[in-house]
Amino acid sequence: MKKPVLVVMAAGMGSRYGGLKQLDPVGAHGQLIVDYSIYDAHRAGFETVIFVIKPELEEEFHRAIGDRLSRKMEVRYVHQRVDDLPEGYTVPQGRVKPWGTAQAALAARHVVDGPFAVINSDDYYGPAGFQALYDYLTTHPNTPEHYSFAMVGYLLKNTVTEFGHVSRGVCVADEEHHLLSVTEHTHIEKGTVCPRFTEDGGATWTDLDGDTLVSMNLWGFTRSYLDEAWARFPAFLERTMKENPLKGEYYLPAVVSQLIAEEKAQVTVLPSHDKWYGVTYQEDKPAVVAALRRMTEEGLYPEELWG
């Protein structure tokens, strides 16, 4: 099998954060939050990282992280562009934002030819998930019956912020730890008693158990995922051009759910009890900085990640 590569989705707009959170340092020596994720991935076995970025940010990414990473890993860049669409489709007038996480993964379709992991650039995942995912990807090729995918699952209570709402994919798995479904909820809050979500702007709320399994977009795929996502892109566009042409998003988990429903893919859930840290909002940053400082003092990370 080919060695897995790491795809980092880093083209988000950062509207709730109020800036380019992907490039905002959180470590004592200027490390970004993604430095720690890539460090964990590297010590798990990943040797190549592919950044999915906006074209105009490539030079800034080189300076902020890519140049120092290149001393330890192969670093590549691909661009998520709003006009990267299947033949016959054009960008709706007024559309500025890219088309979501599935399109972000598809930006790497020309450079990924084997197994790969996908992460967000503004999330801290902890080392356990990367090791479990690397071990899975190096031992589970596709079978004649199905594609072999994996997802690292986190407990919802370990993934919410104190300062606003987050998007999470709420997961259901069977007794053999195979994923049955992922439902994307774009407005989950911590709540006073337990996490809760709304789908109508806060008019009504539904409580969620804190031990609910959620996706943090830490996925492991074979190349087949990209082929399937590209083939399904036109159907998404046809629907979205009618319903929500300016803001509709092609979610990565939505493609996974389709493949599960069609029995074309089997997704193994790899549980992690590591705590998530992220910078969804500016107010999140002090807690992230403090947590990474503590983990460094405890020896989980060196002071200088890349030497």
Image (cartoon, rainbow, N blue to C red):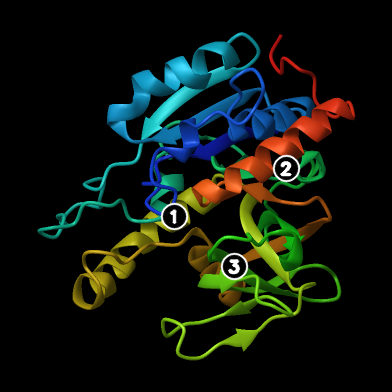
* Residue name at image x 75 percent, y 60 percent: 158
Q: Amino acid at mark 1?
A: Ala
Q: Which label belongs to residue 169?
A: 3
Q: Are marks 3 and 2 in contact (CB under 8 Å)?
A: no
Q: Amino acid at mark 3?
A: Gly
Q: Are marks 3 and 1 in contact (CB under 8 Å)?
A: no
Q: Nearer the viewer, residue 213 or 137?
A: 213
* Residue name at image x 60 percent, y 87 percent: 206
Q: Which label belongs to residue 137?
A: 2
Query: In this rendering, does residue 3 appear at all?
Result: no
Query: In this rendering, does residue 211 appear at all?
Result: yes
Q: Nearer the viewer, mark 3 or mark 2?
A: 3
**Image vertical order of residue 112 relative to residue 218, above or below:** above
Give the distance between the C-alpha atoms of the residues marked 2 and 1, in whole angstroms.
20 Å
Name the residue at the bottom extreme: 204
Name the residue at the right extreme: 298
Structural crowding at the residue carrying mark 3, measured as other residues with C-alpha within 10 Å and reported as few (<14), some (14–19) or many (≥20)? many
Q: Nearer the viewer, mark 3 or mark 1?
A: 3
Mark count: 3
Where is the C terminus found, in terms of image quarters?
top right
Q: Which label belongs to residue 102?
A: 1
Q: Which element is circle 3 on?
A: strand
Residue 210 x/y as whole percent: 76, 73
